[in-house]
Amino acid sequence: MKIGFIGLGIMGRPMALHLKNGGHELVVPERASLTGEIRAAAKVVPNAKAVAAESEVVILMVPDTPDVAAVLFGPGGAAQGLRPGSLVIDMSSISPIETKEFAAKISEKGCDYVDAPVSGGEVGAKNAALTIMVGGTEAAFNRAKPLFDLMGKNITHVGEVGAGQVCKVANQIIVALNIQAVSEALVFASRAGADPAKVRQAISGGFASSRILELHAERMINGTFNPGFKINLHQKDLNLALSSAKALGLALPNTAVVQQMFSACVAHGHGELDHSAMIMAIEGLGNHDIRKNKK
Amino acid sequence: MKIGFIGLGIMGRPMALHLKNGGHELVVPERASLTGEIRAAAKVVPNAKAVAAESEVVILMVPDTPDVAAVLFGPGGAAQGLRPGSLVIDMSSISPIETKEFAAKISEKGCDYVDAPVSGGEVGAKNAALTIMVGGTEAAFNRAKPLFDLMGKNITHVGEVGAGQVCKVANQIIVALNIQAVSEALVFASRAGADPAKVRQAISGGFASSRILELHAERMINGTFNPGFKINLHQKDLNLALSSAKALGLALPNTAVVQQMFSACVAHGHGELDHSAMIMAIEGLGNHDIRKNKK
């Protein structure tokens, strides 16, 4: 099958190559940043419109909501080239609400739309072990499923268009709040005179157990905050959660607090560190530095 | 060995009986609430002082900090009866800070003191499968260890006196905040039109995975909130966390928010429900009922 792939960054590159190795043909838009490996594996055309014109399926893997809007509906965008009957699969992590608008516009072109954000990071992408959360019709999901099987392992059809993005946001809320949970508990333990490593060991088998307590607590205890998943990216995801919640008329108090903790980390220059470095925001609460701006 | 056991409630009864079945003699203080099974298994004496006078080891399993203070230092309290060389083991979940004060006073009597709060609930107590978090000297821990082995499975010597209670508080912080995390995520998913059960299934294998997502999310989705662990008790534990944090000069922002969520549940008459019922506080945010008090 001819597959257009737009967004060949750290995640997109290995995902596209798995499709190629699965026997598909790749079409990609020209970018100065395309690697030699991708140029060798794919046909390179001028822009997203040209990608769409040549492809049965167009996959997007770009950073944020405005990037998806630009790739689909901007000048030289995919929507101008799409042939009726084509399938658009957006694997980016973007707004669930705007996803529904994008899908409606793509539907007007006689095409299917599936939102299919992933989790599992660069390692999951390289090992074709991504978790893929899918929104769309049953028919569109079944059409995309063989491609997902080449890129991921835990593939769930969550519901109608937008449900994949909703699911990804829910996932990012839990991960962030679980990091905050472990941060508050370990800072408390440490300030109260206990060894955080011993505390983690003691509680790991019980109701407090989580993947975050397993992996991120160890990073916190060792102070090794190389990413991993960057605070800047997780903050983007929580902004998505809070703006969507606002649109839905819903309050998410702890998500809002955690977003502020991430903001504190960014403000102190820690945005490129792993999200487990959020513990520094809890450790720093109560420090006094407004005197810096006193003349 | 002759073991005094004070606090024969839902947790204490099976724990004491495991010690009896392990070949030890039990001494307990008279209470109208003592069950026939306990009366048959133990020697019943008038009060905590008499228990201490007859025992090598005195175990406490009572509800809260003031209860431990009363049992040890109140009228007819254990401290009056303790023989030099005895060991006091407090398995209640109480203040880590007051624990240090209690231990110091017991030490003046020439006795050892170990704090050893548990998690695992009634089921863990019945199955001798409790997680036990221990604070005290190495020697005192080693002395208590054979008794812990009769009551629990995951037994960790966390540190000096108080460290067991610190660890338990850390555990309760994580459990509460993970419940909040799953609550916010599932309410978000539901309001955004996705099926929470599908969302839970989709994210269960990844970084969002936790014991709370496994067990409590299912209760939330089914709306079955029979305890389990009651909101009233968890709220007590978070009060302990926040009062200890205050004494330590430490801010725990999300713990404070979650305590308020538990307060909202209690205010609506849900204090006796399972702590997973906290999701109702998130669902109810934005409801308007101050008009009730308008004349």
Image: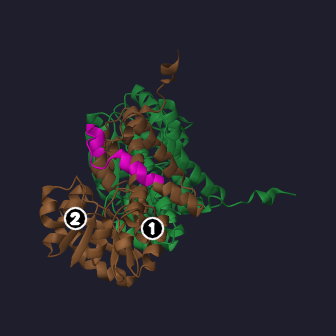
Chain colours: A green, B brown
In this view, the residue in front, B166 or A130, is: B166
Crowding at dot 1, Cα within 10 Å, few <14 / some 14-19 / many 20+, comes out as many
Residue sitting farthest toward the right: A295
Residue B92 percent across, percent down from the top left: 35, 62
Judge whether B160 appears above or below B189 on screen.
below
Q: Main secondary structure of the magenta part?
A: helix
Q: Which amino acid type is shown beneath numbered disc 1? A: Thr
Q: Which amino acid type is shown beneath numbered disc 2? A: Met
Tag of residue B15: 2
Q: Point out the stretch of residues depicted in magenta.
A: B217-239
> Do pointers 2 and 1 mark residues of a single chain?
yes
Tag of residue B292: none
Crowding at dot 2, Cα within 10 Å, few <14 / some 14-19 / many 20+, comes out as many
Picture residue at 29% right of the left edge, 78% below the top: B144
> Which numbered disc flags the more N-terminal residue, 2 or 1?
2
Judge whether A50 appears above or below A218 on screen.
above
SS of the residue at dot 1?
Answer: helix
Q: Is residue A148 visible?
A: no
Tag of residue B99: 1
